[in-house]
């Protein structure tokens, strides 16, 4: 039996019209996702497709945000075009969450670092390591991915990190990486590599200000914990 078209619904029931009349905060996750999907199929409305897609991930948006195109298209009615729109939307959301307002471009806390990097790193199934560069006033002047690891560890290439920091004329450096396990507590290798990096950049009058490890819901800061490495 063919479902009724969304066009036959009352205005307050149609996702697009409801958004225009009441604002996006009044829409459910299903309704917002239906707007992204745009159109349904012969047998299902866009709302049906959105509901099915969310059901496939237990109704969790964080799980949906980690899906790849091929996984999205396993849901009947979700083709490459719809999958691309969904992927692009979640990527924009991650970039927005990681964006720091201009007035916060002076980095003075690990919280700012975590807010900046967690949206990108916390859900990765492998380790990634980034360097944040600061000038003498602790103004953020750039960031760069410096290494990529496996599920268990990332080998930090100290020479590359030092080289890039010198090229940017950085006076301060903050190292950031993630633990796919979700537990941000540092391991012995994290401590050893942090100490080695601190000594290496000091030769070039660059201060290692912090090493922040991103977990699933929490983060760990060497500086906040006053570990001897950065004291």
Image (tube, rainbow, N blue to C red):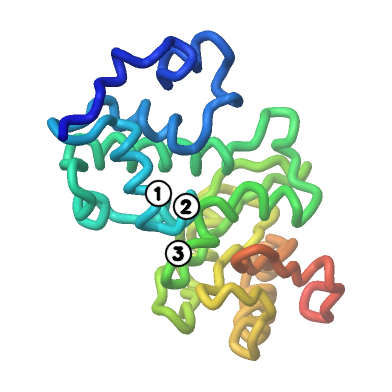
Q: Position of residue 208 (x, y in %)?
A: 70, 65
Q: Quadrant of the C terminus?
A: bottom right
Which residue has dot 3 on it? 124
Which residue has dot 1 on it? 54
Near-viewer residue (221 or 194): 221
Residue depicted at x 30% and y 13% = 8
Vertical position of residue 170 compared to residue 105: above or below: below
Q: Position of residue 122 (x, y in %)?
A: 54, 61
Q: Position of residue 180 (x, y in %)?
A: 51, 73
How many numbered marks have been drawn onto this rendered protein structure? 3
Q: CA distance from mark 2 to mark 1?
A: 5 Å
Q: Position of residue 91 (x, y in %)?
A: 41, 42
Residue depicted at x 63% and y 76% = 183
Q: Are marks 3 and 2 in contact (CB under 8 Å)?
A: no
Which residue has dot 2 on it? 59
Q: Earlier in the sequence, mark 2 or mark 1?
A: 1
Secondary structure of residue under mark 3: loop
């Amino acid at each position: 039996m063919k479902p009724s078209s969304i066009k036959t619904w009352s205005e307050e029931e149609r996702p697009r019209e409801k958004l225009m009349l009441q604002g996006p905060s009044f829409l459910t996750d299903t309704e917002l996702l239906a707007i992204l999907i745009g159109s349904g199929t012969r047998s299902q409305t866009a709302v049906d497709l959105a509901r099915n897609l969310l059901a496939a991930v237990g109704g969790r948006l964080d799980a949906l945000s980690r899906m790849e195109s091929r996984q999205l298209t396993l849901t009947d009615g979700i083709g490459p075009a719809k999958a691309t729109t969904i992927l692009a939307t979640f990527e924009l959301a991650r970039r927005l969450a990681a964006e720091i307002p201009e007035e916060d471009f002076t980095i003075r806390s690990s919280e700012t670092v975590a807010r900046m990097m967690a949206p990108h790193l916390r859900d990765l199934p492998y380790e990634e390591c980034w360097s944040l560069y600061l000038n003498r006033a602790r103004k953020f002047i750039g960031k760069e991915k410096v290494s990529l690891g496996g599920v268990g560890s990332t080998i930090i290439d100290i020479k590359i990190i030092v080289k890039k920091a010198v090229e940017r004329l950085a006076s301060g450096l903050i190292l950031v990486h993630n633990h796919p396990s979700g537990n941000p507590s540092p391991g012995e290798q994290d401590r050893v590599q942090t100490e080695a990096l601190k000594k290496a950049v000091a030769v070039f009058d660059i201060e290692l200000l912090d090493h922040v490890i991103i977990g699933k819901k929490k983060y760990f800061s060497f500086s906040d914990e006053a570990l001897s490495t950065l004291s």
